[in-house]
C-alpha cells in the first residue's frame, strides 16, 4: 500500500514540476523583449542591444532534463530559424524576415512555445503626443502634375529619445499607383540600418496601397548613433517618392497621403533605446492636388497630324536628314527649361534621336501602339 502511494506521489510531483517547467517556457517566437508581441522595431532593438552586451531576453528555457532539453541558458525567442541553437544564422534569418525575404518565423521543435496569446502592448504617450506631418508643414496641398513622380516631405516632432521607428503610409489607388524610395534627412541620415518594404495593398482597405520604412539608430555590430529627439520642434527627417496616376479625370482633385497599415510591420511606431517600449505617434496626412500635364501631344505623332502612323517615321527620317523639324515641342520636365520634340520620343529615353526611329519601325512590325513616352511628360496614346 505504501509503495503504491509513494509511486503516485512521485508521479504527481514530477507532473507538477513538468507543468512548472512548461509554464516557464511560455513564449511567443521572436518576442525577444518578452512583451507578448513580436515586432519589427522593439524586438529588433532589444536583439541588437543583446548582441552588443546588453541584457539577455527575459525568457530562458534551457532544461537539459526537462521539457526543453537544451543546455542552459537557452533563449527560445532568439531561435527564429528553428535550429535549436542561437547563433549568427538567427540574426540573418530575423533580419531577412522583417525585410520580407522569409514568410515565417520558426521555433525549436524540442522546445515548443507554450500557449500564450499575443497582445498589443504599445504604450500610450501621456505627455504631449509625438507627431508626424506628411507633406507641407503649413498643411497646404502639394500641387503635382498627373503622371509625374514627386517627393513629399516627412516631419517629426517628439520630446523623448527614439532609437528605432517605422513609417507606414497609405494612399488611394485611384490617385496614387506607387510609393517607395526615400531620402533620409537630418537626424535620421546617419542611422546605420534601414529597410524599405515594397509598395503593396493596404490590408485595412482594398482600395488603398501602403508602404513601410523601418529605420534603426544602431546595428548588430555598432553602438547607437544620435537618437531622434527634436525637443518638441518639427524637424524634417525624410522625403518619400510618390508616383501619381496618369489620369485626366483626377485633374483638380485632392487626395491625402495618410497613416497606413503594412502587413507584419503594422502602423507607424516609435521605440525607446532599450527596446522595451513602443508607442504610436499621431500622423497628420499630407494633401496632394493634381494638375494636368504641361505637354499635350500624341505619342509618336512626329508630324503633328494628331495620329501615329508610318508617315511619322518618314517625317522623323527626313528631320534627321535636315528636313523640317516636328511642329510640336514643349518643356519637359515642367520647369526644367528644356524644350524639345517630345512626340518623337518613342523609347521613353526623354530624348528624340535615331534610336526612336528604330523603335518606331519595330513597333509597327510588332505593336503599332507600343511607343513609350518620356515618363516626365507622358502625353497620350
Image (cartoon, grey):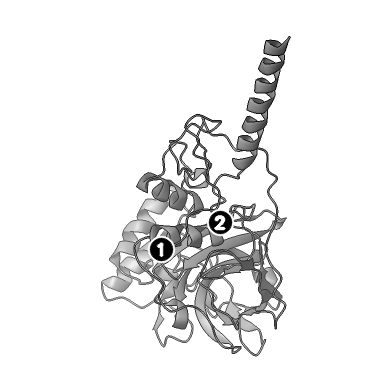
Q: Looking at this view, is 6 or 248 the one in front?
A: 6
Task: Name the outermost residue toward the front.
Answer: 2
203 displayed left or right of 348: right
Report which quarter residue 16 is drawn in: top right
Residue at 70% x, 45% y: name it.
Answer: 117
Label 2: how many residues lie within 10 Å, few (<14), some (14-19) or many (20+)? many
Residue for badge 1: 346
Between the C-alphas of marks 1 and 2, the distance is: 56 Å
Looking at the image, which residue sits at the far left?
Answer: 321
For label 1, the SS is: loop
Q: x%, y% of residue 88?
A: 36, 48
Left or right of 129 in this view: 60: left
Secondary structure at numbered mark 2: loop
> Taking the image as drawn, is residue 149 in sight?
no
Q: Earlier in the sequence, mark 1 or mark 2?
A: 2
Quarter occupied by the N terminus: top right
The answer to whether residue 126 is left or right of residue 154 is right
| Disc 1 crowd, CA 10 A, few/some/many (<14, 14-19, 20+) | many
Reply above or below: 91 against 66.
Answer: below
Amino acid at each position: 500500500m505504501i509503495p503504491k502511494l509513494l509511486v503516485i506521489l512521485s508521479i504527481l510531483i514530477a507532473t507538477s514540476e513538468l507543468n512548472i517547467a512548461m509554464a516557464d517556457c511560455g513564449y511567443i517566437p521572436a518576442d525577444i523583449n518578452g512583451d507578448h508581441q513580436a515586432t519589427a522595431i522593439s524586438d529588433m532593438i532589444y536583439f541588437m542591444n543583446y548582441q552588443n552586451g546588453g541584457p539577455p531576453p527575459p525568457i530562458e528555457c534551457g532544461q537539459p532534463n526537462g521539457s526543453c532539453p537544451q543546455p542552459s541558458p537557452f533563449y527560445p525567442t532568439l531561435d527564429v530559424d528553428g535550429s535549436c541553437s542561437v547563433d549568427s544564422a538567427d540574426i540573418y534569418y530575423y533580419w531577412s524576415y522583417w525585410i520580407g525575404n522569409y514568410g515565417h518565423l520558426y521555433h525549436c521543435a524540442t522546445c515548443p512555445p507554450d500557449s500564450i496569446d499575443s497582445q498589443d502592448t504599445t504604450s500610450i504617450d501621456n505627455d504631449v503626443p509625438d507627431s508626424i506631418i506628411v507633406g507641407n508643414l503649413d498643411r497646404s496641398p502639394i500641387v503635382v502634375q498627373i503622371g509625374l513622380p514627386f517627393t513629399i516631405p516627412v516631419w517629426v516632432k517628439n520630446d523623448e529619445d527614439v532609437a528605432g521607428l517605422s513609417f507606414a503610409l497609405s494612399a488611394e489607388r485611384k490617385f496614387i499607383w506607387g510609393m517607395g524610395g526615400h531620402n533620409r534627412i537630418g537626424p535620421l541620415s546617419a542611422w546605420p540600418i534601414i529597410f524599405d518594404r515594397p509598395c503593396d495593398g493596404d490590408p485595412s482597405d482594398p482600395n488603398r496601397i501602403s508602404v513601410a520604412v523601418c529605420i534603426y539608430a544602431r546595428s548588430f555590430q555598432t553602438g547607437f548613433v544620435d537618437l531622434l529627439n527634436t525637443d518638441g520642434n518639427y524637424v524634417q527627417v525624410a522625403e518619400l517618392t510618390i508616383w501619381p496616376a496618369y489620369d485626366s479625370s483626377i485633374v483638380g482633385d485632392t487626395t491625402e497621403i495618410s497613416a497606413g497599415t503594412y502587413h507584419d510591420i503594422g502602423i507607424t511606431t516609435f521605440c525607446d533605446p532599450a527596446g522595451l517600449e513602443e508607442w504610436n505617434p499621431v500622423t497628420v496626412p499630407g494633401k496632394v492636388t493634381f494638375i494636368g500635364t504641361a505637354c499635350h501631344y500624341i505619342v509618336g505623332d512626329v508630324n503633328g497630324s494628331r495620329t501615329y502612323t508610318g508617315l511619322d517615321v518618314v517625317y522623323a527620317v527626313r528631320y534627321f536628314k535636315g528636313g523640317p523639324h516636328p511642329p510640336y515641342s514643349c518643356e519637359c520636365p515642367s520647369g526644367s527649361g528644356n524644350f524639345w520634340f517630345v512626340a518623337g520620343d518613342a523609347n521613353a529615353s526623354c530624348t528624340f534621336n535615331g534610336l526612336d526611329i528604330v523603335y518606331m519601325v519595330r513597333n509597327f512590325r510588332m505593336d503599332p501602339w507600343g511607343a513609350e513616352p518620356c515618363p516626365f511628360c507622358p502625353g497620350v496614346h
